[in-house]
Amino acid sequence: MDPIMYNQPLPLNIPNSEQELYQRALALAGYTMKELADAAAMPIPNDLKRDKGWVGMLLERYLGASAGSKPEQDFPHLGVELKTIPVNAQGKPLETTFVCVAPLTGNVGVTWENSHLRKKLRRVLWVPVEGERSKPLAQRRIGTALLWSPDSHEEQQLRHDWEELMDLIVLGKVESITARHGEVLQIRPKAANSRALTEAVGEFGQPITTLPRGFYLKKAFTGALLAKHFQI
DNA sequence: TGCTGATCATGA
DNA sequence: TCATGATCAGCA
């Protein structure tokens, strides 16, 4: 598949199957941001300082993801989540990966099995993208996509961290959580700025107001799953 | 405000 | 050098 075939209105049609989506993602490997932006008639920023989600949005358009902000998977009918991941020349992640917002209230009855995080990570299309800041955005290339589901070990790791972190939230200890908690998963602020506030539970069970948080996958975890795939 | 898409930038 | 905590943009 050549970007030339994308000389048609984007966003592209929604893929009908997981295989179609995967093939489409694989076909993008090797192209630069400039090539894809040009073919999509999208203006390309000089850097990502003020356009942090630009690469993600570009890929969404090429892959036919339903645009807009919904708390659902990118391809709800396929049950697949799309994640672009910035990597260095060795293919190792340069950043942690945001998964979803951490629920700070209304957690009665929430279990690992029915958690938002587990659903999001059930099936992920990872698209590595060169992300080193020394390389101009226009020249950065797409890598080889990977369709992934957590294996039993990965799921255990995620579940362990998730349960530990959710316990702290439910026990009113949100504000004592730092990014150092968790082996593969961490909770960090996820907000417009440090003045943005949301409701949570305090240490005496009272309502408090705190910074919104998000679940992030640590680099070692995403690095391992990428490495595992490309070694085979 | 809170969700999506994330990366920035500073202190350790 | 690197991870943590902070931040940016668009939309509903």
Image: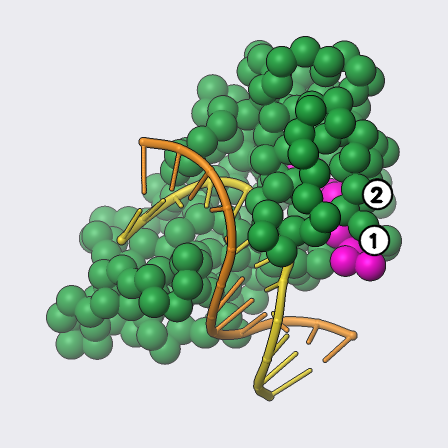
Chain colours: A green, B yellow, C orange
Task: Classify residue A33 as left or right of residue A193.
Answer: right
- Residue A163 seen: no
Reply above or below: A152 against A64.
Answer: below
Could you tell me which chain the residue with mark 2 belongs to? A
Comparing A130 with A185, the one in front is A130
x%, y% of residue A145? 73, 34
x%, y% of residue A118? 45, 44
Q: Which residues are magenta?
A: A126-134
Q: Quadrant where the C terminus of chain A lies?
A: top right
- Read off the residue under disc 1: A135
Residue A130, magenta (yes or no): yes
- Read off the residue under disc 2: A139
Looking at the image, which residue is at 28% across and 49% down? A110
Q: Quadrant of residue B8?
A: bottom right
Residue A114, magenta (yes or no): no
x%, y% of residue A168? 33, 69
**Marks 1 and 2 share the same chain:** yes
Residue type at mark 2: give it. Gln
Reply above or below: A192 against A16.
Answer: below
Residue type at mark 1: give it. Lys
Comparing A209 with A164, the one in front is A209
Circle 2: is it few (<14), some (14-19), or many (20+) Cα within 10 Å?
few
Q: Quadrant of residue A208?
A: bottom left
Looking at the image, which residue is at 76% across and 46% down? A137
Comparing A120 with A50, the one in front is A50
Looking at the image, which residue is at 58% across and 52% down? A50
x%, y% of residue A160? 47, 60
- Residue A222 seen: yes
Could you tell me which chain the residue with mark 1 belongs to? A
Q: Secondary structure at mark 2?
A: helix
